[in-house]
Image (cartoon, coloured by chain):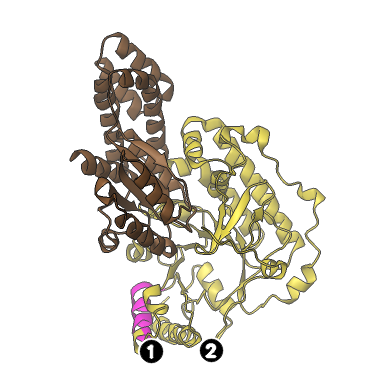
Chain colours: A brown, B yellow
Amino acid sequence: MSRIQEIAAAVEMGKAKVVGGLVEEALAEGCDPAEILSAGMIEAMAVVGGKFQRNEIYVPEMLVAARAMKKGVEVLKPRLAAAGATTVGKVVIGTVAGDLHDIGKNLVAMMIESAGFEVVDLGVDVPAGKFVEAADTDPEVSIVAVSALLTTTMPAMKETVAALNASANRSRFRVLVGGAPVTQNFADEIGADAYAPDAASAAQKARALCVGE
Amino acid sequence: MLMNKKATESEATTAPQRTAVNLDYPVTPKENLKMVFDRKKPLWVPNISTERGWVWCPHDNDRPAFGVSAKDWFGVDWTFVETAGGQMVTPNTFIMDDPLQWEERLLFPRFEKMDFTPGREEAAAKVDSSVMNFYLMQDGLFERLLSLAPSDAVFCFLVEEEESALRYFKTMADYKIALMDKIIREWAPFDVFINSDDWGTQISTFISPEMYRKYIFPQMTRIVDFAHEHGKYMVFHSCGKIEALTPQIVELKADGWEAQSMNDLDSLRRRYGRQLPIQIKMDTEVTEKPGVPDQTITDYVHDYIDRYAGDGGLLAFYAARDAHVNELIARELFEYSMERYRKVEG
């Protein structure tokens, strides 16, 4: 098993305590930092996401894997920066106004981050204007991810997407929506670019929107 | 931004009123519902919306009273969210960063120093003995853990700190049982505990069925057994798709499950019949639709009964803003299901 495969296995199994050390060893052996990130970690998290979608693993196992990856990224970050490597894109995420639910949103943020994105988390109960401001003022934002858990806050999601669609910089970013009551039909109806039914799909959709995978 | 309603003291401590409908009951709704909980065929499908009473104890601060934004006994700060019709932990106020700290940080209420009896007689006088009266326990073992620390830390704790997690669930169940005992001994009489604990998301259980079996169900067995030993029925409320857990819920001898629509309810009703009474909510797109014609309601209620009633084990529930619709549903449910169960043997 190569060092990069070892890293991938450790990420998949959520071994946060060993991933950092394995990444250091891989770097010392001359592995390319970008290769460690993509083959050792992002691909491993895609495997984890697939298992989650098939109900082979559940939220805790997915979270410990994401946390293990984070440990590896901490070690890699300075080397990636020195090599001029950038993230796949920047994602602004939040739960809409009137909705305090954050478990699903946090899970999506973690999976999107694990797919190679930088994530700006606006938190919960976020007014439409705050989403727009975050997307408008930062030209690096490529996706705005909007979450709602309640049927009663779906109108707030509609309002948020409408506000984002009215932004002068709308062509610069894509809008991804999700949450328990949200469906593909609703996403289409309110003018979102994409819908994801779960955290793993959200990471896949984000990559598809940004890099066409 | 959120508009958080602060309930007045009287709103907060008064149990919700049921909207009773006068029907020509051959036995009391309480006797009829008892048949379902005893796994017998009832005379009609019990109507949980109109044939259930509530008992609430104002001294119980396991969770602040419904409609109130306040701290509970553990110091968890709850915000009532009107749009959600419930309370959530106020964002960024968790009492711990890591649930592993629970053994040092969590202070349990000392029931031996508390008196739940003030107001008991007045509350007891309001209890309607013709219906089953329910006592809601809002924070189940799992939900309570999620109220103490951020969810990602909680989920990692469950994977990585097995011994501490096992001790947490055992200790929290001890506390729950002590609270149940206190309420039974010192507050107004009631018949049914509801254990409210959300175990699922829209698409699956939060944690694996194996993890529920390891951490939660051994303690739930103790809680259900305690209720039964004290003459109370135990109904589970859980949001989410948790059908994978139903074999374990049956093993626990739960007397009912308030199920959500993302579960395969047709198959669950066929599989469990009277063995696991299931509460199924009628479609709000029908029951709450403004101006819905009477015939639509009648047809819908008949379909609902034909689909789910079986030979017992169905608990009907619905929401209707319109008083006429409420009465129409109650009457159709009663009369049509009486007729149906008359023809069913057993």
Vertical position of residue B120 compared to residue B160: above or below? below
| Label 2 chain ID | B
* Residue under pointer 2: B23
Q: Is residue B300 magenta?
A: yes
Q: Could you say which disc has been placed on residue B294 in the image?
A: 1
Q: As drawn, is B144 to the left or to the right of A213? A: right
Vertical position of residue A162 compared to residue A4: above or below? below
Q: Can the viewer see residue B175 in this picture?
A: yes
Q: Could you say which disc has been placed on residue A75 in the image?
A: none
Q: Amino acid at mark 2?
A: Leu
* Residue B314 screen position, x and y as percent: 44, 71
Q: Real-space Cα distance between discs 2 and 1?
A: 18 Å
Vertical position of residue B138 compared to residue B27: above or below? above
Quadrant position of residue B174: top right
Q: Amino acid at mark 1?
A: Asp
Asked if both marks, 2 and 1, belong to the same chain, the answer given is yes
Q: Can the viewer see residue B205 in this picture?
A: no
